[in-house]
Image (tube, rainbow, N blue to C red):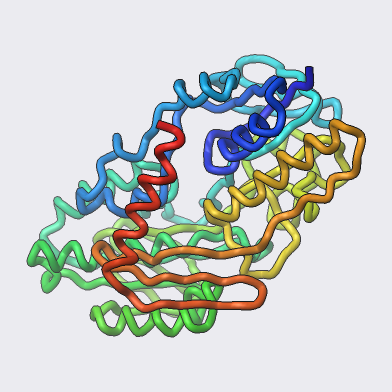
Amino acid sequence: MQRVTIVGCGFAALTAVKTLRSQSPDLEITLVSPRAEFHYYPGSIWIPSGIREPEDLIIPLENFFRRMRVIHRTAEATGLSDDGRTLFTSDGEIENDGLIICSGGRFIKKLPGIEHAITPCEGIDATVRIRERLRALQGGTIAIGFAGNPKEPSAMRGGPMFEFLFGIDQQLRQEGRRDKFKLVFFTPAQSPGQRLGPKAVQGLIQEMEKRGIETHLGHKMKGFSANSVTTEGGSFDADLILFMPGMTGNQWFDNTELPRSEGGLLQADAQCRVTGLEQVYVAGDSGSFPGPEWMPKQAHMADLQAVAAAKNLLTEFTGKQPTETYKVELVCIVDSHNTGMLVARTQNRNIVMPSMRIFHWLKRFFEWWYLRQYR
């Protein structure tokens, strides 16, 4: 019986589990993660307003693991040896015949004073802190922005920050408090949202202008204080700062000889195989993959890569050359609390549909549809 170890418990990891089990009923699958839980981060944009509570988005996985016949090891990965055949964890060593790394990325927190900013995608707890801070504020300036990893263009997550920006604006309007606040959007990019396509950039800027949101664009970040944001283009006051830095590889990668990209992620080929290693794959935020510069770090892309990785690993078990690859595809709804803008991008097309109420409800429906497989 072949043994596969999966590191992680997010979108890519769980999709890898489903793909492996559907294609190989007798496979032994071990999944390593600190908790047997799936955290649905796309829904966390609604926690500040109360549309969602943490318990709506934290899904216990014991039943799913039982159905999939997965052995869950409550541990953290700490290292690797034997060309990937032995995974070191905080709960001992795990030997495998195949390894799929889906442990996500790590935010680069090197800017001075970054501890004064909340990074929403760090977890559900972070968005609860945003909700508490918003409730406590009687007025002032809310600064919302993001940056990237200069050495890894794909390793950024800007989309959710637009959603927090527009969502908080709408929430304050519904609470009758918008006139007491100034919202400022900031990013080193001159044209924010370029990964979504030129049409989306124009739509996002127009939406900010319509909502009276100020912008501070095109200036390299220098740091933060408890009540200010500083860039090379100047400083401005802020009573609440939400900031998404660029991403790099997990800390535990440093304890391995896994090949890394210049930006610190695991170097992978078009089949999601870690470069130069047999039966070692990567999917999602942990990997640096060939593709266009706009290739997104989002759940949908992680799912596509996980399917390719799982199928290719099984192909390697048969002694054949893996050929499965992923389609580069960006699909998202930039939600605004009660409406949403649909953005889709492929190698050949870029579709942008203006904000409509139906897209907000479509995003909520997709959440229900996606999560039911794990409940």
Total count of labels: 0
Image location (x, y in percent) of residue 238: 28, 65
Quarter of the rendering containing residue 237: bottom left
Residue appearing at x 78%, y 55% in the figure: 270
- Quick one: 327 or 212, which is closer to the camera? 327
- Check the image and report above or below for 316 versus 298: above
Q: Is residue 315 left or right of residue 47?
A: right
Q: Is residue 185 left or right of residue 298?
A: left
Q: Residue furthest top?
A: 92
Q: Is residue 341 visible?
A: yes
Q: Is residue 210 left or right of residue 369?
A: left
Residue appearing at x 92%, y 34% in the figure: 319
- Quick one: 180 or 313, which is closer to the camera? 313
Image location (x, y in percent) of residue 306: 65, 44
Q: Is residue 120 visible?
A: no
Q: Name the quarter where the N terminus is drawn.
A: top right
Quarter of the rendering containing residue 310: top right
Residue appearing at x 41%, y 77% in the figure: 353
Image location (x, y in percent) of residue 374: 45, 33
- Quick one: 125 or 294, which is closer to the camera? 294
- Quick one: 314 or 180, which is closer to the camera? 314
- Check the image and report above or below for 339 versus 47: below
Q: Name the quarter where the C terminus is drawn.
A: top left
